[in-house]
Image (cartoon, coloured by chain):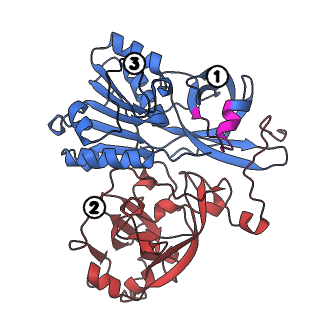
Amino acid sequence: MAEKFVSRGFVGKHRQPDAALRERIPPGQYETKDFPVLSAGPTPRTSLERWTFSVYGEISEDLKWTWEEFLKLPSEDLTVDIHCVTKWSKLDTTWRGVAVDTLLEKVNFVAQPDVKHLIAYADGGYTTNLPLTDVLNKKSWIVYEYDGKPLAPEHGGPARLLVPHLYFWKSAKWVRGLKLVRENRPGFWESNGYHLYGDPWREQRYAGDK
Amino acid sequence: MQTLIWQFGTVVDKLQETSRTQSIAIDVPDWAGHKAGQHIDVRLTAEDGYQAQRSYSIASPPEEPRVWITVERLDDGEVSSYFTDELRTGDRIELRGPVGGYFTWDAQTADSPLMLVAGGSGVVPLMAMIRHRSAAASRPPARLLYSSRSHEDIIYRAEIDRLVAVDSTLEVFHTLTRQQPDGWTGFSRRIDRAMLEEVAWRSEERPDIFVCGPTQFVEVTATSLLELGHAPGRIKTERFGPTG
């Protein structure tokens, strides 16, 4: 039986003193007040005139919104905690955007019960896969404002997916479309060593984590 | 895919690189090997069970049996200051890896010139690529553009000089943004488009490009490279937000 390991001389000076806040930080994460930027390549810049948002794949008729049309969709303000797989968590971030439920309300899921996943497509070629049960019922949004201001390009503007209950790589920056699919296929980071699902509370960081 | 299990390594060497950075060599039994550009996760545990995790880029090439990381000390850093101030040879450290399958470079399969652009301690994963390239039998030509605050802040300075001296296909360009020594002939400003146009491979040469540094540094560099005609898919970035 291995004895309990202690890192000699480590005290840990960044403990969250507030127990209520501490409970909101998943295992292995630390709280940051900054908003770090991580992305695999250059920041894409699509003009709002050319920007569209599409829902396609397993759907009887593809849906498409222009930027102007998208802004007219019912939107909501939300305050959520976000958790990046690179270990930082940020509490009480505020966003404005459209619930994915709103975008998918015309999809007849009853008629096609085997369509259980979607792939988010983004400018720059980024993709990420999500189960439908994790985006519907007010669990995910396409957001275009952060902290009361238009979402900055380096943070995914003009619009990004927001799925706060999963690691933040699932919240695809520069998102341009959702493709409804039958098969759960790994997206960009999921094909590069990261977990297929990515629950921060179970610390599903990398492929193979239980 | 292989599950990344937590394992123990032993600190076997420590080197002061600059006033703020140290390199730490870790002997990891049964290390699975890594690619240049990957990182490890480390986990520190206090007496009462409190834990902190951070990611650190691997500085050593796949050819080196020990895993080296280079840590920049942040004044308010919880983990970085432990590494630089407290950790010593013989200490055990818990880690898992290697992590990351995208920001990597392999000399064996590379068929394009290599362009590396580093800001500060963002040089660490790029140094793994340079060291890997130096150990490889065949190697494409490579250029490193490296931005530091001052001459004293250049991490791996002596080693880079040595590698350049014996390899005519490795070119290194320094820029010092805050302070330059007398007689300095390198660049003296933050990296910009004109500098990249001057030293980077041209887009027609289709280089493999790796950029690593602080957020604004990466934004400016990657955007300038796009403007110079490089394809977005050839520009791989890693942003070095300071992690305490």
The residue at the point 62 percent across, 28 percent down is B30
The image quadrant of residue A111 is: bottom left
Do discs 1 and 2 share a chain?
no
Residue at the outermost left position: B204
Callout 1: residue from which chain?
A: B
Residue linked to disc 1: B14
Name the foreground residue: B180 vs A147.
B180
Q: Colour of chain A?
A: red
Disc 3 or disc 2, which is closer to the eye? 3
Q: Position of residue B151 (x, y in %)?
A: 45, 24
Q: Position of residue B34 (x, y in %)?
A: 49, 33
Amino acid type of the residue tagged 3 in the rendering: Asp
Q: Is residue A13 left or right of residue A35?
A: right
Question: What is the span of residues highlighted in magenta in the rendered image?
Answer: B71-84
Q: Chain of mark 2?
A: A
Question: Residue A172 versus residue A35: which sits nearer the camera?
Answer: A35
B90 with respect to B39 (left or right): right
Estimate how packed mark 1 is, as few (under 14), some (14 to 19) or many (20 or more) residues with alpha carbons within 10 Å.
Answer: some
Along the viewing direction, whichever of B180 and A122 lies nearer the viewer? B180
Residue B81 lies within the magenta run: yes
- Output the letter for the chain in blue: B
**How far apart in space, not on screen, are marks 1 and 3 (Cα)?**
31 Å
CA–CA distance in space, label 1 to label 2? 43 Å
Residue at 33% x, 55% y: name it.
A43
Amino acid type of the residue tagged 2 in the rendering:
Arg
Please give the residue where the numbered disc 3 appears in the rendered image: B182
Q: Disc 3 to disc 2, how far (Cα)? A: 41 Å
Q: Residue under label 2, please give it.
A: A45
Q: Secondary structure at mark 2?
A: loop
Q: Secondary structure at mark 3?
A: loop
